[in-house]
Image: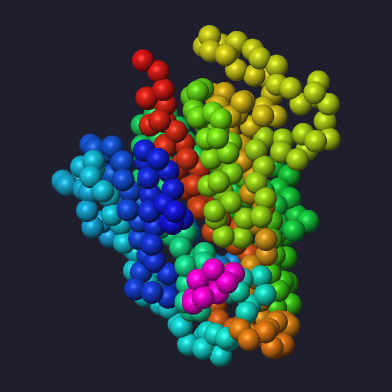
Amino acid sequence: MPGNSFGRLFRISTWGESHGVGLGVVIDGCPAGLELDLAAVQAQLDRRRVGQSRMTSARREPDEVEILSGMFEGRTTGTALAMLIRNTNARSSDYDAIKHLYRPGHADHSYDAKYGFRDYRGGGRSSARETAARVAAGAVARQILATMGISLVAYTLSLGHLKAQIIDENEIENNIMRCPDPAVAEQMIAYVDQARRDLDSLGGVVEVRARGVPAGLGEPVFDKLDALIGHAMFSIPAVKAVEIGSGIQAGNARGSQNNDPFIQRADGSIGTSSNHAGGILGGISSSEEIVVRLTAKPPASIAQAQTTVDQAGEPATIVVKGRHDPTVLPRLVPVAEAMLALVLVDCVLQQRAARL
């Protein structure tokens, strides 16, 4: 089955390539009557777009969203909601000299192996530019979630060996790394600048949190909430590892350390006194904060000379020119929020049918 769709009741289908006419998304199952704030959708796209700082590609794209269907008089109609984002600043000639070469770290060979033919301009469908459509859909999802008191926040937790020591969410949008620790953010910026001078790139970790999530979301056994989150996050380009709660550190703990004792909150609801589980127990939300971490690899497009082969398997040297991110982390932040929002809104709609 083609892999361009995600979700069940709130189902998105994305389309488009990095250097095509544009990108877009069709949302099936968006409830009718939502007063969709288009400015808020655009604000999320602006957070993701290229050219916003020296931490991103120099490609200039306004990423202005156009609504093609599914809205009338400012509200969603319940029918397919279609959104378009046009490409206006593609520079395909950057790829002419290397179109027969396989770029190290990229999906060039994988796409040739699968399809026998590929769009070499910027990676085509494998380009991270595809995530613009996800962010547009996620912006709709988070507006639905907001009506239920569910909110999301993400930030750059670490870059290489540098890690935020404090989490001040008011600082996230105050620096170009979207790091919640302003002092560490400055170190990160300097580290990226050095990597750029070295014709290199850097990876790191983005953490995303969801608050106000009610207990009971998730569909055992194969559609557990953490399984769906893993599916969503691993579908993002450059993501190589996903952790929930204490993640891999749980493997270093004892049960007495890793268990989260249950308590009764002041409002009478049931909660836990710690949150090593990251808000999910048995694949179902527990009502605690959902905590997810994404590890992203360094961007594969670097200006250093690298060894590779061409499509015939002959050895070659490649230098990838053009406009590329020195790190994906600042732009991964809104993408991570969008994907978690898409998972949660779909689970909320499914939960409505789970009991009489």
One can see residue 170 in this view: no
Q: Is residue 319 above or below residue 148?
A: below
Question: As drawn, which residue projects farthest toward the left?
Answer: 73
Asked whether 186 or 225 is in front, the reply is 225
Asked whether 75 or 236 is in front, the reply is 236
Residue 98 is situated, as x and y percent measured from the top left of the image, at 58, 86
**Left or right, 93 with reference to 193:** left
Q: Where, by quadrant of the figure, is residue 78 drawn?
A: top left
| Residue range of the region highlighted in magenta in the rendering | 110-118
Q: Residue at x 38, y 53 (%)?
A: 13
Q: Main secondary structure of the magenta part?
A: helix
Residue 135 is situated, as x and y percent measured from the top left of the image, at 43, 53
**Left or right, 192 with reference to 323:** right
**Left or right, 310 with reference to 20:** right
Question: As drawn, which residue projects farthest toward the bottom?
Answer: 97
Q: Where, by quadrant of the figure, is residue 195 drawn?
A: bottom right
Q: In which quadrant of the rendered image does the C terminus lie?
A: top left
One can see residue 250 in this view: yes
Residue 192 is situated, as x and y percent measured from the top left of the image, at 68, 67
Q: Residue at x 39, y 66 (%)?
A: 16
Asked whether 328 or 281 is in front, the reply is 281
**Left or right, 167 with reference to 343:** right
Residue 117 is situated, as x and y percent measured from the top left of the image, at 49, 77
Asked whether 219 or 240 is in front, the reply is 219
Q: Is residue 328 above or below residue 206?
A: below
Q: In which quadrant of the rendered image does the N terminus lie?
A: bottom left
The question of residue 161 being in magenta is answered with no
Q: Where, by quadrant of the figure, is residue 319 drawn?
A: bottom right
Please give the count of numbered marks on the rendered protein.
Answer: 0
